[in-house]
Image: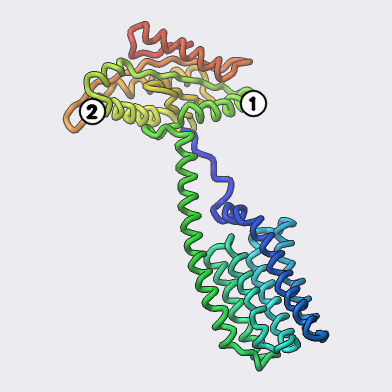
Amino acid sequence: MVPSPPAAADDAEIRFLTFRDFAIRLGYFTTFVPPALALFFGHLQRDLGRRPILGLAGSTLAGLLYPVAIQIGLSRRVLPWLLFGTVSAMNVAVIWALPGLPGGVRANLWLLVFPGLISALLSMPFTLRQTALEVAGSLAVPLIARATYAQAFPLLDYYAILVPILVIFAYFKVLLNRLFHQARAQVQEIQALAVHDPLTGLDNRRAFMDTGRRLLGLAARNGHPLGLIMLDIDHFKRINDQFGHAAGDRVLCEAAQRMTQALRTTDLVARIGGEEFAMLLPDASPAALAAAAERVRQAFADAPMRLDAEALLPVTASLGTAQLTVGDTLDALLSRADQALYAAKGAGRNRVAAG
């Protein structure tokens, strides 16, 4: 069976793409609004000094780096570190500006909540470990500030405001991760059902036609041989009628295993309807195609199939083959193999006919 192609993106990439637009909008909003409110209400009370204006302006400029970086397509691997640096710079600038704002430091501690909120919210696309890094920055910068340029900074008041908020966001982050993985698993299950037969696990007709056209196109462009085998389980209706549909399902599953084992891993095996199967063999010459079809036939004829714990039933199959010729489409190849299959059944079943 042809192996499935690798996923186009890992979970982290999908999570980032899901939250990308949200992060850009929220980044701009939380960067501009708090400094604007502080400057507006501060101006109503009295003229602000140079220090708070420069501090809030610096915080705004630092905050703009992250949404702009997302919008211009900066590498996702760099973004967690950029957010960490951005939030830290915003904290530094705001702490520096607080003493110059009306009411002093304690009255304006609410401004420091926003870098913490930015850290928590904008890290939603990141892993739990990367999110912990952002939160650590929000908690550590005030410690550094107090030890250097803001000795009077009220740490306990700051943590009393911020820590409960971060705990709530941590809970929602874990919950969101869980919901994301559940949704991702459901999407993968739906995708698998869309291209796989749920009973046998083989590709279904839709997947066979999509992959088959691609393989046929490659063979035609490169001048490589390509063979097709159609298989029908002999007297399958009789098996269902006599032993029941559960026994028929077991025969179909066993048939899928025997076909897969008799062919190469690069060959495409699919259940295209009922008891009918198709096998596409890249780089198979006419002789190799005939030999592969005979191996599949013998895989059925050589040993009976188990219907339940006690009952064994001889099961045979009829096969038709067709070789790719110049100008063939997949539908034309299927038609020739199907005609050969009916010829094999008309000749007595349990045999291979070439189309």
Residue 164: image location, x then y, percent: 52, 77
Residue 195's x, y, as percent? 48, 34
In this view, which residue lies farthest toward the left?
310
Element class at badge 1? helix
> In the displayed structure, would residue 55 be above or below residue 12?
below
Give the residue displayed 48% in from the left and 17% down from the top.
Answer: 287
In the rendered image, the vertical position of residue 244 relative to residue 348, given as above or below:
below
Q: Which residue is mark 2?
A: 307
* Mark sitting earlier along the chain (2/1): 1
Residue 295 showing in the rendered view: no
Residue 266 shows in the view: yes
Q: Is residue 304 left or right of residue 346?
A: left
Q: Secondary structure at mark 2?
A: loop
Residue 317 percent coordinates (x, y): 34, 18
**Which amino acid is tagged 2?**
Leu
Question: Can you identify the residue that label 1 sits on?
Answer: 222
Give me the C-alpha separation between circle 2 and circle 1: 45 Å
Q: Residue at x 46, y 14 (%)?
A: 338
Q: Is residue 242 left or right of residue 286?
A: left
Is 17 situated above or below 308?
A: below
Pointers 2 and 1 in contact (C-beta within 8 Å): no
Amino acid under disc 1 = Asn
Observer-nearest of 27 and 337: 27
